[in-house]
Amino acid sequence: MEVYKKINNNVALARDAKGRELVVFGKGIGFASMPYELTDLSCIQRTFYDVNEKYFALLRDVPEAVFLAADDIADTAREELDCTLNANLTYALADHLNFAIQRSREGLNVQVPLAYDIQHLYPQEYAIAKQGVHALCRSLAVDLPDTEIVSIAMHIITAENEVGDMHSTILTAKVISELSAIVEHGMEIQLNKESFSYSRFCMHLRYLVQRMMHGSPLDAGNAMDSMFVTMRNEYPQVYACVQQIDTFLHGTYGWQCSKEEQLYLIMHIHRVCVERAED
């Protein structure tokens, strides 16, 4: 392997035997005069291919231990989540964690909006973030507040969609929280946010919000009209609640629910209400 450009004493750019460019981590790997041939590959701690040049400054500025902790979190997310993650997740996490540690040492605590909702709407991502933040705190002897777990979870959620961004992640959680409140008020119940039915309801709402943001709500034309009429007549209180949701979404975000969207909302709301009544 040819090491040809130093990033810092322990990080450098290299080319493998096939001529592919990569970033290599290893103690003292960037200390020698460049370029040189690295024959003892056992000194390499970690490698990264296809790194955009804009992240080279980040590699220089972020302590190695923080960067590797961020990569550990990203690796865990890739292993445990059944989806494609944005290739830049490690760098986004490293940048965030580095500033979080600095803020912690300065006694600054940043509040994260929708923390409760993120924890309950995305339990798997939250668990991965919690494990990673606690591991970092132990290894670096820092004390990060629990709000940072939510922030890391939000980065993971955003990375689950390659075209996603933090704004859409926050908006989705906000809308789900708002619609859940409408259901609780309209149906006069307290939703069990630990239940499977509520989790399934939230999953439906996540995809509903994504469809609305992209201007592509479900619409089967007249194919489901008879089922819609049947459900509307059989569950009038649920239908009235769905109408409140439709009015709210249109008035607040300019989104209009099709009959098919309303049909699925009736079905999901009925399910969570039945489960709540059986508890």
Image: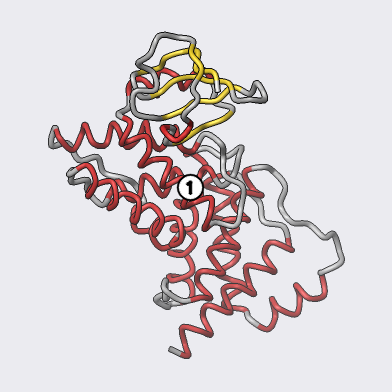
- Where 25 falls versus 159 (above or below)? above
Whole-percent x and y of residue 170?
A: 45, 45
Count of number-bearing discs: 1
Q: Residue at x 33, y 27 (%)?
A: 62
Colouring:
secondary structure
- State the residue in front, 228 or 85: 85
- Where 160 falls versus 27 (above or below)? below
Q: Is residue 110 left or right of residue 242?
A: left
- Looking at the image, the residue that sits furthest to the bottom is 278
Whole-percent x and y of residue 207?
A: 62, 55
Question: Of the residues shown, which amino acid type is indicated by label 1?
Answer: Asp
Whole-percent x and y of residue 185?
A: 43, 70
Q: Dot 1, crowdedness within 10 Å: few (<14), some or many (≥20)? A: some
Q: Residue at x 67, y 65 (%)?
A: 262
Q: Residue at x 51, y 69 (%)?
A: 199
Q: Residue at x 72, y 47 (%)?
A: 216
Q: Which residue is mark 1?
A: 75
- State the residue in front, 265 or 161: 161
Whole-percent x and y of residue 44?
A: 44, 32
- Where 239 falls versus 276 (above or below)? above
Name the quadrant of the C terminus.
Answer: bottom left
- The quadrant in which residue 241 appears is bottom right
- The quadrant in which residue 22 appears is top right
- State the residue in front, 66 or 209: 66
* Secondary structure state at the residue bearing disc 1: helix
Name the quadrant of the N terminus.
Answer: top right
- The quadrant in which residue 194 appears is bottom left
